[in-house]
Amino acid sequence: MIKVLLTGSQGQLGFSIKKLKPKGIQLVSLDKDQFDLSKIANIKNNLEDIKPDFIINCGAYTNVDMAENEKENVMNINANSVKEIALYLKKHGGNLIQISTDYVFDGLSSKAYKVNDKICPLNQYGLSKAKSEKFIGEILGKTNQGMVIRTSWLMGSIGKNFLLTMIKLHQSKKEINVVSDQISCPTSTKTLAEACWKALKLKLERNIYKDNFMPILHWCDNGIASWYDIAIAIGEISTKNGLLNSPAFINPVKSENYPTKAKRPRFSLLDCNSSRDFLGLKGEYWRESLEVSINSIIKNKK
Ligand SMILES: NC(=O)c1ccc[n+]([C@@H]2O[C@H](COP(=O)([O-])OP(=O)(O)OC[C@H]3O[C@@H](n4cnc5c(N)ncnc54)[C@H](OP(=O)(O)O)[C@@H]3O)[C@@H](O)[C@H]2O)c1
């Protein structure tokens, strides 16, 4: 049986990866305490004990603003650990699916970013993720063992994310200010987890990524939106489906009026066309994905 190690198993994506595990896979799901990516010196020994055929690396330092003050820690968790993992896999065999981010781009484009577009991160989080991609390219680029899946604005029914924060704000406030000049697309943890499992299946069945290059995929839900659009949709869908009595009024605000520690790209929409073809998945319109997540939240409350 194929043994898959999932890191960061208590995170929102980890939750969906576990939930959607296909048959015939032995999943070793480890949380931060059981497989700590910041403890670089332990990674090799931990992997020697587990001997995974595949690693889906969902563990990460994901607080984009706090990352600005914790450069070293962020670099260890998000990049140096990945280097160790890649070195282990190169020596012992096995494959890596690394989750990366739209924040590797600077957001100055006005066209959706393609997988081979130049990366130029604006913040420490993006920088650390870009470094992890570089390590995988350098170490596993020619060995057909690594894949990077970039995603954007991830949200599911559990954990910490924009969806759950907005539902609380809709419940407790009459008006909410939400940034309207950052554009990308939300991604449900469910559709991303499906994409990860499909990538793994393709590799197992057809060894499909074998052309001496590190495949980079883009995966977000279909469409385009600002945080403002998503906040409105969350209010509308949650009200329609009985989670809220009524939505709060959303004021669109500019990023400059909502200062944050980390700079964020203004436009970071990922072009997923080639990745959808590669994976043989059509994707889902983001409002429909969002509704599925909201319905899961409603179900979890019962
Ligand atoms: N969230 C987004 O909008 C977004 C967008 C693009 C890409 N991504 C990427 O998608 C992946 C999954 O993100 P997510 O949204 O599921 O994040 P998440 O919910 O924050 O999950 C990340 C998990 O990693 C754990 N973790 C933190 N430090 C760790 C360490 N030293 N060792 C091992 N695990 C550690 C976290 O534990 P604690 O919570 O206890 O710290 C958490 O359980 C990450 O690679 C992230 O960079 C996320």
Image: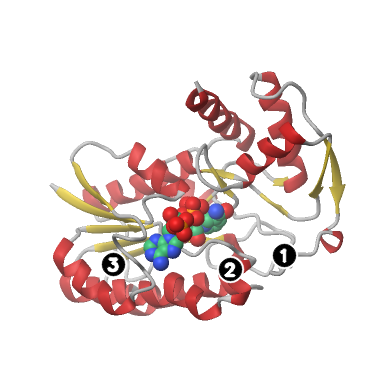
- Give the camera-side residue of 68 and 79: 68
Check the image and report above or below for 250 versus 275: above
Q: Sequence-wise, which precedes: disc 2 or disc 1?
A: 2
Residue 126, image x, y percentages? 58, 70
- Mark 2 within 8 Å of ligand 1, using the beta carbon: no
Q: Which mark is residue 134?
A: none
Residue 86, image x, y percentages? 30, 73
Residue 87, image x, y percentages? 27, 77
Quadrant hosting residue 44:
bottom left
Residue holding disc 1 = 109
Q: Amino acid at mark 1?
A: Ser
Residue holding disc 2 = 104
In space, the residues marked 1 and 3 are separated at their CA atoms by 30 Å
Residues at discs 2 and 1 in contact (Cβ within 8 Å): no
In space, the residues marked 3 and 2 are separated at their CA atoms by 23 Å
Locate residue 145 relative to residue 63 in the image: left or right.
left
Q: Which mark is residue 144?
A: 3
Residue lying at 53% horizontally and 67% vertically, measured from the top left: 116
Locate residue 108 relative to residue 284 in the image: left or right.
right
User: From this viewpoint, is residue 31 visible?
Assistant: yes
Element on which disc 1 rests: loop
Q: Amino acid at mark 3?
A: Asn
Element on which disc 2 rests: helix
- Mark 1 within 8 Å of ligand 1, using the beta carbon: no
Locate residue 101 relative to residue 7 in the image: left or right.
right
Locate residue 298 relative to residue 141 in the image: left or right.
right
Element on which disc 3 rests: loop
